[in-house]
Amino acid sequence: MRRPTGRELTTWLVTTAIVTVLGPLAGLLWANTIPRVTYLIIQGEPLIADPEGEGPVGIDGRFALIGLVAGLLCGAVGYAARGRRNDIALILGLAAGGVAASLLAWRTGHLVGLGHFHDVVRHARDGATVTGVADLRAKGVLVFWPVMAVAAYGLLEVVVRRLLPGDRGDGGSGEGDEVGGDELDLQSAPTGRDVDGRER
């Protein structure tokens, strides 16, 4: 098994770090755009007043949407900024950074207003209602960010293929072409003679 080079390790670390730091920003965006969810206080415990309502589903959906968009952007930027022969390092960095960013987004968004929420619940009487904070019920949406980042990178790799080194596109008339590793001269023969000048 080949050991990664210093350049590949650096690429992986830098990519992972850059994507990871986007997590808290995404978490703040999530916390400030979630729909309102009402909790009912029963014996000192907060219970969602309408578990199947649009609020709880909307919170998970908003997180999934943010993760999808963030992953798409990370994959596109990573592809645009890639260096040759660093594809694997970049993909691993996008995946690892996406996982870390998604977890940080969840925890950061959940912490926004959490202290106040607990304080209100602690002093609320039975039957009172309070507004909840951002939290995930469908933990599966945490994978949307890394999966979308890797998928976007791979899709761009397929759609926007780079020319191989030294390839300048279609050759002009009389330019040698490689067939089976040997050059084959495709120039046309004069009338009545073959390429070597012999008469037919």
Image: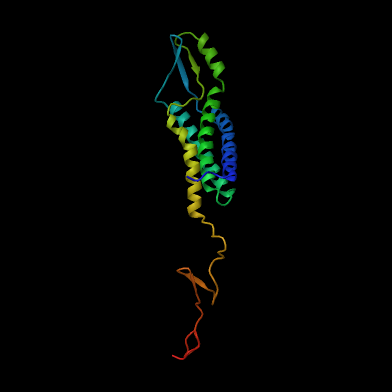
Rendered position, 82 above or below 52: below
- At 54% across and 66% down in the image, what residue appears? 169
Residue closest to the eye, 174 or 23: 174
- At 54% across and 77% down in the image, what residue appears? 174
Residue closest to the eye, 144 or 38: 144
Rendered position, 29 above or below 69: above
Residue closest to the eye, 51 or 1: 1
Residue 168: quarter of image: bottom right
- At 54% across and 19% down in the image, what residue appears? 114
- Name the spot of residue 183 as percent of width and height, x first: 50, 72
- Name the spot of residue 39 as percent of width and height, x first: 46, 18
- Name the spot of residue 156 as percent of width and height, x first: 51, 51
- At 56% across and 38% down in the image, what residue appears? 16
Q: Residue furthest left?
A: 52
Rendering colour mode:
rainbow
- Name the spot of residue 197 as percent of width and height, x first: 50, 88
> Total marks drawn?
0
Where, quadrant-wise, is the C terminus in this rendering? bottom left
Residue 9: quarter of image: top right
Rendered position, 82 above or below 134: below
